[in-house]
Image (spheres, coloured by chain):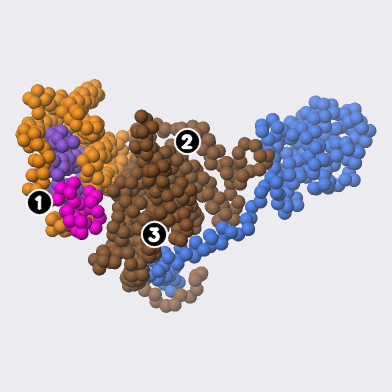
Amino acid sequence: MSSVTVAMLYMLFALGGVAVYLALPGGQRSARIAGLIFGLSAIAGFAVLAAGHLFGEDVSAVYFCILAAVAIFGAGKVITHPKPVYSALYFVLVVLAVAFLMVMQEAEFLGIALIIVYAGAILVTYVFVIMLAQQSGASAVDGRAREPLLAVLVGFVTMAAVVSQAGHLPGNSTAMVDAPDAALARLAVADGIPAVDEPGEADDEPLGGSNTAQVGFLLFSQYVVALEIAGLLLLLALIGAVALVMKRVPRDVPVAPAPPLGEIGKEVPPF
Amino acid sequence: MIKDEDIVVVEEPQLSAAERWYIPQIADGMLVTLRHLFKKKLTVHYPEQKRDLVVGNYRGVHRLNRDDQGRVACVACFMCATACPVNCIHIEADEAPWPDREKYPAKFEIDELRCIFCGMCEEACPVDAIELTPVHDLISLSREQMIFDKEKLLEMYDQTKNLKPRKNPQITGYPATGDRREGKPADNEETAA
Amino acid sequence: MDSLTPYVILGAILFALGMVGFLSRRNLIVMFLSTEVMFQGVIVNLVAFGRFHQNLQGQAFAVFLLVIAAVEAGLALGLVVLLYRRRNTLDAEAWSNMCG
Amino acid sequence: MIVEWVQGQAQLVFSCLLALVVVGVMLLGVAYSILAERWIAAWVQDRRGPNRAGFFRLFGSFHFWGLGQPIADGGKFFLKEDIIPDNVDKPLFILGPATIFIVALVGFAVIPWGGQVQIGDALLNVQVANPDIGLLYVLGVGSLGVYGVVLGGYASNNKYSFFGGIRATAQMLSYEIPMGLAILVVVLATGQLRLEEIVLSQMGDGDVWNVVRHPLACFLLVVTLFAETSRTPFDMPEAEQELVGGFHTEYSSMKFALFFLAEYAHMITGSAFLMVLFFGGWHIPFVPGLQPGDTAWWAMLLKMLVMAGKIALMMVFYIWVRWTLPRLRFDQLMRLAWKGLVPLGLGLIAFALGMLYIGKPQAWVWTLVGNVVILATMLGITALIPSRVTGRQYDMPELPPRTSAPASIGGP
């Protein structure tokens, strides 16, 4: 990356930071609208930069720009929307965008797994809990952010710090630019894993050479212990979740008594 | 006070393993519905195909009977309008053009939407001129069409006289009593109201 | 598309946005949602690295990440339900008091 | 130049055409399955059902047995007033029906309709898309289906709708697990994720349909499909007697129609999926024209017809079950899923893995024997556990000990 690009990226981050700060719940309506506009322009700037960087490679660059923009927009909405249900739904948007990015990178299995696990199970559970715990739309909890300025500072400085190192990635070293294929082949051999283009020994692969088969082969050959541990972890989490929630917990705070008949429909204080 | 020995402890039936998977019940139910799927249907294709009316004295749409000379049998006595609990009968009487009775209905209207088909008019009629027919498909496109006038009621008689013959055909006229000239229209209206 | 940089930047942005959300929101559920956004950033990076190296280890790691995310969601939501039952609120600041 | 490009992209063009045809036919199929539902409902109840609506008066008083009914219904739905209540969450209220309908439609992209067809020199797949992950795609799309119901229920700002949404979430999450297990059994047996390959694996020499190999898995999939489409006996989310209409209580006009049509679209997708996995898709044994080698255009049409016929049969089964079985209570529903179907699915998976380990995943005689053994084991285990059918025992106080034989049932 040229230094100009990096500088522009930092400027976009600053703009994005201001946007998130303005859009976090608690501010005026006008501030939130300004935050939305700033955020959209920052995303557009990022998309344009990425498009410029990737220009001429192939058509998937366009998809990348669109999907990345959607993912970032969704993530911004997740953290700034005052209603938790909308947060969860925007997160579904993020998951879908990321899943399509996976499919674009020939990781079809992971893309679909993301959709099934995240969008199909985890997020539904989130929505379920939100609906259980918070039936009446936005509450006072979501109306105000906690230390928004510091949070935004920390977050975006982290982002900038990570990105400042992106310039040193091997993908941008001259060796890679000069002979990408050779370098990639060297890396692949060093990893000791059959590359995507050359599937391993045919007799070991009952499922053919699809991405799913290869990931499965890798998981069940090299990472089989880790996989078992992951399964055990899931089981433990299942038991733990059941054990946590099954207990009858005494309430610290008494539930608000039912209002007298005349006051039904008026606002009831939380406790 | 319920005594202990009166308490009947009903044990819940223990289900077998198959029954707890709902399998025999489901199979039974599916067979029942399958049998009904091919059974003869109880309903009929209604407007083309009509069921015989089981109830002979069904109280449907009204009709105004004709006497043996084809005249309207009503003598405009207002008994039916008086008896009507919902005031759906509107009669305007006039001097009868025929010698055997004093009055006849110049106008005879029944609001069939208002009518509750109680049959009181039929009970009240001294000459059995108004009767309820077994006709039950009372339909129209507007409220106005549901106000049956004399012609329509007579037409109902023509349509249904074979279905349900007139109860007492021998009563055809109303015996003239006293001075035929004394009845004033104002009185009639009062009675009708 | 072999260039890694855009993916790394996208991952960083998602991660940082999730972090901002985790730090600044007060609703427990939204805080956990923010951690899931951070997971997304990491997954994007892992898959991009794997693709860059022409192997599948990135994807295998991402599968494990999915497992962790599922575990986290299950336990975290269980905890949220528990905490909500106790205090009748989802506010994280209701628990900032350490007196027990 | 365009012509050459089109020739180069024959599969793409064919897929687009097929997608158009399939979506059109499916929308028509949805409309007519509603008519079929009403007919069968009527016949089961000894009535005649809708038999009036014909096509204008072109043919005198001939009624076409009521075949014009769906068109009339559709017109009615379009013309009704579309009410959005004041207190609803408006964006989500609109998003709900849109989501559920889109999800129901896109699942169709990977269903194989008729093997391959020879057009010119090109050998084309009669399938809109044939990705590596066809099966996973169907699962993924299916798992998104719950959002429509949940959003509709949440956005309506109505207690009953809300309960419907909550129930739908719990139900669909629970039944996705046995569904995944049942599908996994097929994947283990055939070693394929491409739906077309799964169909082909059921028709070689000595091969049989998967339903013969794995009848229990088929049963599991059928049951879970009923639950996923929330059809009776699993129509908890919309239970009329308890929840008015559940998640669609507040909906009217086209939005309600979308919910209504999406239910049938889901059913059609699910039926197609079941047919592909367990009933050989477009294949019927020993019938010429329906074998994988037949690639003439008429064979394609015949295969599509067979597939449609199988789907129609499954739809009739759906409807037949609906008008037979009463609704389960919610705790029974959950218990059936977690204590009945999930262990059954796990047993089937273990068995299929064992068959894979000894290298005979396709030996249908042995899989059949194994299925019988598993069924017997499940029934045996069930028989050992004391029956708690009604759930009433949980909160009952101790009954007084019976002192003497009851005098009479009626009492004084």
Residue at 23%, 34% in the rendered image: A60
The image position of residue A206, as x and y in percent, is 24, 58
State the residue in front, B87 or D59: D59
Q: In the visual, does A145 lie left or right of A164?
A: right
In the displayed structure, would residue D389 be above or below residue D65?
below
Q: Real-space Cα distance between discs 1 and 3? A: 40 Å
* Chain with colour purple in the figure: C
Q: Nearer the viewer, mark 2 or mark 3?
A: 3
Q: Which mark is residue A192?
A: 1
Instruction: Assess whether residue A217 is covered by the magenta stretch.
Output: yes
* Chain with colour brown in the figure: D
Read off the chain for label 1: A
Residue at 32%, 51% in the rendered image: D194
Which amino acid, by three-letter code, is at mark 3? Met
Q: Write down the residue under mark 3.
A: D203
Q: What hue represents chain A?
A: orange
Read off the chain for label 3: D
Is label 2 on the same chain as label 3? yes
Decide: few, some or many residues near mark 1? Use Cα within 10 Å; few <14, some 14-19, many ≥20.
Answer: few
Residue range of the region highlighted in magenta in the rendering:
A194-220
Pointers 2 and 3 in contact (CB under 8 A)?
no
Which amino acid, by three-letter code, is at mark 1? Gly
Q: What hue represents chain B?
A: blue
Instruction: Assess whether residue D114 is covered by the magenta stretch.
Output: no
Which amino acid, by three-letter code, is at mark 2? Ser
Which element is circle 1 on?
loop
Specify whether residue C81 is in view: no
Decide: few, some or many residues near mark 3? Use Cα within 10 Å; few <14, some 14-19, many ≥20.
Answer: some
